[in-house]
Image: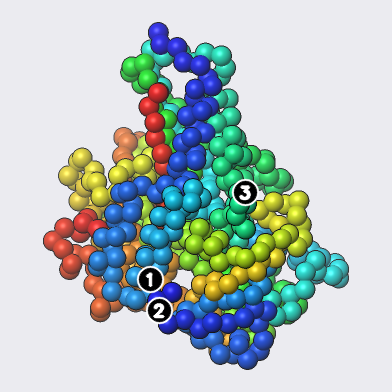
Amino acid sequence: MSVAAKSIRSPLDERTVRMLKCGDSVLITGELLTARDAAHRLMAERISKGLALPVDLAGRILFYAGPSPKPPGRVAGAIGPTTSGRMDPFTIPLLEAGLKGMIGKGRRSEEVRRSMVEHGAVYFAAIGGTAVLLSGCITSMEPAAFEEMGPEAIYRLQVVDFPVIVVNDVQGGDLYLRRDGAVSRPDCGGSRQESADPCRI
Amino acid sequence: MRKIPASQITQAVKELCLEANTRLGLDVLEAMRNALKREKSLLAREILQRIILNAEAAESENMPMCQDTGFVVVFAEIGQELCVTEGLFTDAVQEGVRQGYLEGYLRKSIVKDPFRRENTGDNTPAVLHSEMVDGNEIRLIVMPKGGGSENMSEAKVFAPSVGIEGVKTYVVDVVKRAGANPCPPVIIGIGLGGTLDQCALLSKKALLRRVGSRHPDPFYAALECDILDSLNRLDIGPQGFGGCTTALGVFIEVFPCHIASLPVAVTIQCHAARHAERRI
């Protein structure tokens, strides 16, 4: 990204997590684990039954994504963030299990935000609908659990310079909440001020 | 009576699934480039640029622009002087979706049942809206609709006393509540009138309009502009990080309604506003 970006490595260590601030542009190199609705439900079920998780979450980043199938000649299919809010009901036990980062889009619940501060975890947004560009950051991809679930399986990805934005940092900062209540931005008025024709966009 | 074999419908639907998922409409791209000229927030500009780059990469690499290749909605206008032979029209459409999604490496996002969520494995069934029209041609439109933006869509049947202001407030609130979830900049389809089912369908059909076009009725054209302006003052911006590009377009479709009702449906479309069309 042209906005000055911080480069970090995944799995995350505590020093890295603490250095990230809401609004930072970040390039991640290392490992990501994909997991979306069904994988979260299954992981939560295992935790509630006292069973081991199929993947080690210590220091890991979960990427809320269900990739499209891999075409021949490519490392990965199209991949991008899904709406994180759907994972909220399952997230706190995963943070308790050592999860340190999550990549998705959209706001998190108050409970999850609080738990992230408590457990020292960060939430990143990736740009939704840029699935070809994001796929290009993947250097390897292999199923790690629940392979039979296709796009809902957990995949282990190795990525290089995977671009994200810090939404929630460990100090409780929230890039979306920072925007709430703002009616208009002084540097960017409504379209009516830009043009006599508000439909000209 | 003109006859066309069902296999021709299948082939067309398959090709339209591939085209829609890999090629973003020039109207959407142009709207995004125009937004880039007005947008001042650095992050918002960066996001718009990446969305444009991604659309270009999708086309040149023949990849779906978004991993969510959607629930396929097919609109078919079937000329009544035309007869489909060697198979059922509905089956031919579903087979086209099946082939397109399997051969195009597109994601299979449909589960068989709302509670027993087993994947159908081929992205069928598509939702098919057929209409008999004059003539001996078929017009097929394939719209792969993403789940993230569909999840933030809403409908409500108001009493007529809600008035224009009440409807406006409702639509703006729906988009505000949606925030970053539906991948803004969004396109808003609004259905007004009819029964609840008809109203929801109108809100989908509204999304087929060319971005930048206006409603032919000046009354609704003005309302579309007014709502678009209000949405772009919400400061949601690209991906919800602020900016004046929350929506690229607002399209209203209307239908007569019952003396007791004023139904309103709002379908939110993400920036990957995909649809492809063909006449046979």
What residue sits right under mark 2 in the picture? A3
Q: Position of residue A155 (x, y in %)?
A: 69, 62
Quick one: which residue is furthest to the left in this view?
A196
Name the amino acid, label 1. Answer: Glu
Q: Earlier in the sequence, mark 3 or mark 2?
A: 2
Chain of the residue on which disc 3 is drawn? A
Name the amino acid, label 2. Answer: Val
Element on which disc 1 rests = helix
What residue sits right under mark 1 in the picture? B46
**Horizontal arrangement in the rendering, residue A168 relative to residue A4 (left or right):** right
Q: Are marks 1 and 2 in contact (CB under 8 Å)?
A: yes
* Image quarter of residue A138: bottom right
Element on which disc 2 rests = loop
Dot 2 alpha-carbon crowd within 10 angstroms: few under 14, some 14 to 19, many 20 or more: few
**Horizontal arrangement in the rendering, residue A140 relative to residue A27 (left or right):** right
Query: Can residue B79 be seen in the rendering of this structure?
Result: yes
Q: Nearer the viewer, mark 3 or mark 2?
A: 3
Dots 3 and 1 on the same chain: no
**Horizontal arrangement in the rendering, residue B246 relative to residue B180 (left or right):** left
Q: Is residue B49 above or below residue A23?
A: above
Q: From mark 3 to mark 1, how far is it between C-alphas?
A: 31 Å
